[in-house]
Image (spheres, grey):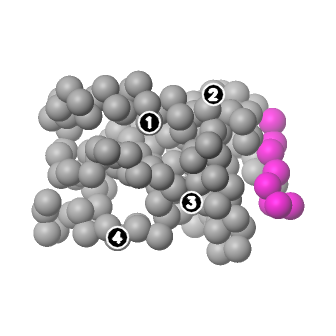
């Protein structure tokens, strides 16, 4: 654990969708991409090459397939982007970004992937959905992941 690391301090504990042995899946706060998640290693490490075999195996054989399957069932993304940049937070995590060729809606909110067929950035950094919509999305995704 690193005292300076916001992920080690559980800064985003209220966004957790599911816990695994080595990983925690969180709903990303900015839902410009409907269902975007963050998959965080529970122990402090910085790079992919620092993962232990058991952590890699759980990530690639269990966590990613389960999260993608849940998103497939809920929103039918056309593509997934995965990003492991580490520029803002030096704690190993992976962004799973569902991409959509056509708009999707959730509880009356329309989501449009204006960057379809291109890099996922730039996108509006201040894109907000209501807390109620966020909480309902979190509940729906958590329930799907628990099945």
Task: Measure the alpha-carbon separation of dots 1 and 3.
Answer: 21 Å
Please give the residue where the numbered disc 4 appears in the rendered image. Answer: 11
Considering only order in the chain, which callout, 3 or 2, is on the residue closer to the N terminus? 3
Dot label at residue 29:
none
Circle 3 SS class: loop
Quadrant of image for the N terminus: bottom left
Judge depth for marks 4 and 2 and give the one in front: 4
Task: Measure the alpha-carbon separation of dots 4 and 1.
Answer: 21 Å
Circle 1 SS class: helix
Please give the residue where the numbered disc 2 appears in the rendered image. Answer: 79
Q: Is residue 108 magenta?
A: yes
Q: Nearer the viewer, residue 95 or 67?
A: 67
Q: Position of residue 53 (x, y in %)?
A: 20, 26
Residue placed furthest toward the front = 147
Please give the residue where the numbered disc 1 appears in the rendered image. Answer: 63
**Horizontal arrangement in the rendering, residue 34 relative to residue 119 (left or right):** right
Dot label at residue 30:
3
Considering only order in the chain, which callout, 3 or 1, is on the residue closer to the N terminus? 3
Which residue is painted at 62% across and 43% down in the image? 147
Q: CB atoms at circles 1 and 2 under 8 Å apart?
A: no
Q: Position of residue 28 (x, y in %)?
A: 51, 56
Image quadrant where residue 116 sits: top right
**Badge 3: residue crowd in 10 Å (few <14, some 14–19, many ≥20):** some
Circle 2 SS class: strand
**Badge 1: residue crowd in 10 Å (few <14, some 14–19, many ≥20):** many
């Amino acid at each position: 654990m690193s005292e300076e690391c916001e992920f080690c301090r559980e800064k985003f504990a209220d966004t957790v969708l599911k816990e695994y042995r080595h990983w925690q899946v969180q709903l990303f706060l900015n839902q410009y991409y409907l269902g975007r998640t963050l998959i965080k290693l529970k122990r402090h490490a910085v790079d992919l090459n620092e993962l232990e075999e058991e952590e890699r195996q759980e990530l690639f054989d269990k966590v990613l397939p389960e999260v993608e399957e849940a998103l497939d069932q809920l929103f039918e993304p056309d593509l997934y982007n995965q990003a492991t940049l580490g520029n803002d937070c030096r704690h190993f995590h992976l962004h799973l970004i569902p991409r959509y060729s056509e708009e999707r809606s959730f509880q009356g909110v329309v989501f449009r992937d204006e960057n379809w067929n291109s890099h996922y950035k730039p996108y509006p950094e201040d894109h907000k959905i209501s807390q109620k919509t966020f909480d309902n999305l979190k509940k729906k995704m958590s329930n799907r992941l628990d099945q």
